[in-house]
Image (tube, rainbow, N blue to C red):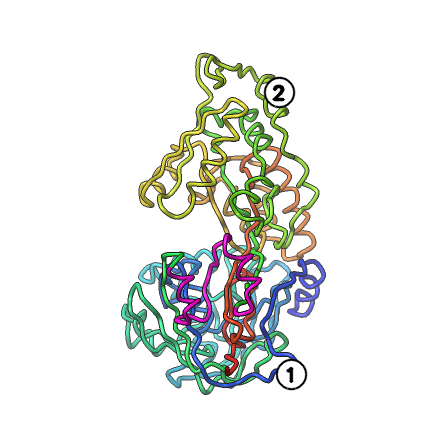
Amino acid sequence: MSGRVRLAAVTLLALALVLPSGGPTLAQAPRTGGTLVYGIRQEPSTTDPHGSAAAVAQRVLAAMYDSLVFMTPRGQFLPWLAESWQVTPDAKVYTFKLRRDVKFHDGTPFNAAAVKFSLDRIIDPATQSTSAISALGPYDHTDVVDEFTARVHFKDSYAPFLYAASTPYLGIVSPTAVKKWGVDFIKHPVGSGPFKFESMVPADNITMVRYAEYRWPPKGFFTNTGPAYLDKIVVRTIPETSTRMATLENGETNAIEPVPEKNVAAMTRDKRYRVLKAPYPGAPRLVFLNVKKFPTDDLAVRKAVLYAFNQEQMVRTLLFSVHTPARTPLTPASVGYDKSLASMYSYNPEKAKSVLEEAGWRAGADGIRVKGGRRLVLEEFIIANIGLDEPAQFLQGQLRDVGMQLEIKSMARAAWYEGINKGDHNLVPLFYIYADPDLLRGLYHTGRIPFNWSHVSDAGLDRDLEEAYKTPDLPKRIQIYKRVQAKVMDLALALPLYNEFNLVGIRTEVKGMVFDPTAYPLFYDVWIEKK
């Protein structure tokens, strides 16, 4: 399949996302110069795209590294480091024709050998890759056909590879720099992106400066076509919410992420600021229900949990109506989202009670239901001090109303991971951002621990997920994923909570900020209006 055919299919079927932009109008010509100071809640985990990169690292990685292709928020693939590509009908071999004018920040040339080096590096155990190796799927090897042609081979069909190849995790690194610095590459990262690394102070900031030679952005999405407008970007780690807000107000930062939901309305009314909202694709905020542990091993209990929960009330009460209620396995911003499933478990506490009654769960003296001498007590495992307490407490109250007792266990991250991977929990929250519906395989396939924290093992579900993974035709893939989503709902494997937006607060002098398909900010077009 050619790049153009695939591009057309994605364009027709991907959801059209309406994303805000502070970009230039006819009356505003971009100004070169200035510094963007960007305050974020969590420290970027690495400057190496192939290492153990958490999602927050994308803010930095996307500025320093280029990828083979670019995916727009509408699902359209554009040429980037690769000028064109071809895909075999079985989606096992991808051939990329590469640009000839690209140089890394260290002055060395980009070519097919750099592509091979980067992909091979990801699967090298010494790299200790997590996100990148997962995105690379069943990678086998890369052939250097000639200096500017790379042919990537997979052991099995891998339909999601173009999306994976568009992410910063598969960004191309300078082979020269990696060989020179070895394990210290993280302190001296070199890509070919519009910004190059200048310095890093752990737990405080990462500073990047304009790469003056940059002239190869993906065409058709950005306004800019040459070097970035900004002189410098300083990404500051500011964990405390009130402190982060204060820095925006006093001018220490001119953009922050995320804006607390309670502050969105006031900031929207204040002419000094703008709040940009970008919808996250992938799984909504949800709570997995463990099918292997009593009492959530009972389908009736799992269904009752879904009927008992009032998403609208939680969004209104806890989230100031900034986000939207979720009722499906994928968010509306996701390719393959099936709106028809949204009414399957409408809030209905009386229905929840009747489902439990029919399954033999009778109200005890204290109101908590009992069956076979065992009380209907559920345990939800959450990580301490990261904002999960209030949603868990809200759910706790609603489950109590229908005769279920929810006990909340707040844990350190390491103990939390150990417990949920073993299946010691009944409930566990998750938020999974991914712009390809293959994320469903990560969440519901038998062999995908971690992340399959419902611990489901269903042969039919596995077959569908494997078929979709190997199907290069997007319309066919989407039909398979709709079957998967329906099965997830039939089995009541997860309780959807809400569809989240990335909330970025900017001072009004910041212009041109746009978002990638995963709702993360891109800085290439950003410029600072002179006051």
The foreground one among 515 and 421 is 515
Instruction: Using the image, determine if residue 253 lies above or below residue 160.
Output: below
Task: Write the residue at 64% across / 39% down.
Answer: 486
Q: Does residue 98 appear in this view?
A: yes
In x, y percent, where is residue 455?
47, 36
In x, y percent, where is residue 432?
50, 50
In x, y percent, where is residue 434?
53, 55
What's the amino acid at mark 1? Ala
Please tell me whether residue 269 belongs to the stretch shown in magenta. Answer: yes
Quick one: label 2, few (<14), some, or many (20+) residues within 10 Å?
some
Task: Write the residue at 40% across / 84% down.
Answer: 108
What's the amino acid at mark 2? Ser
Instruction: Using the image, determine if residue 30 lies above or below residue 421.
Output: below
Please tell me whether residue 500 belongs to the stretch shown in magenta. Answer: no
The foreground one among 392 and 52 is 392
Instruction: Using the image, determine if residue 99 lies above or below residue 482.
Output: below
Instruction: Using the image, determine if residue 277 lies above or below residue 331.
Output: below
Q: Which residues are magenta?
A: 243-272
**Label ID, residue 458:** none
Quick one: label 1, few (<14), some, or many (20+) residues within 10 Å?
few
Question: Label 2's element?
Answer: helix
Label located before the other in sequence (2 or 1): 1
Looking at the image, residue 126 sits to the left or right of residue 437; the answer is left
**Residue located beneath label 2 in the image:** 354
Question: Label 1's element?
Answer: loop
Quadrant position of residue 349 = top right
**Residue located beneath label 1 in the image:** 27
Viewer-nearest of discs 2 and 1: 1
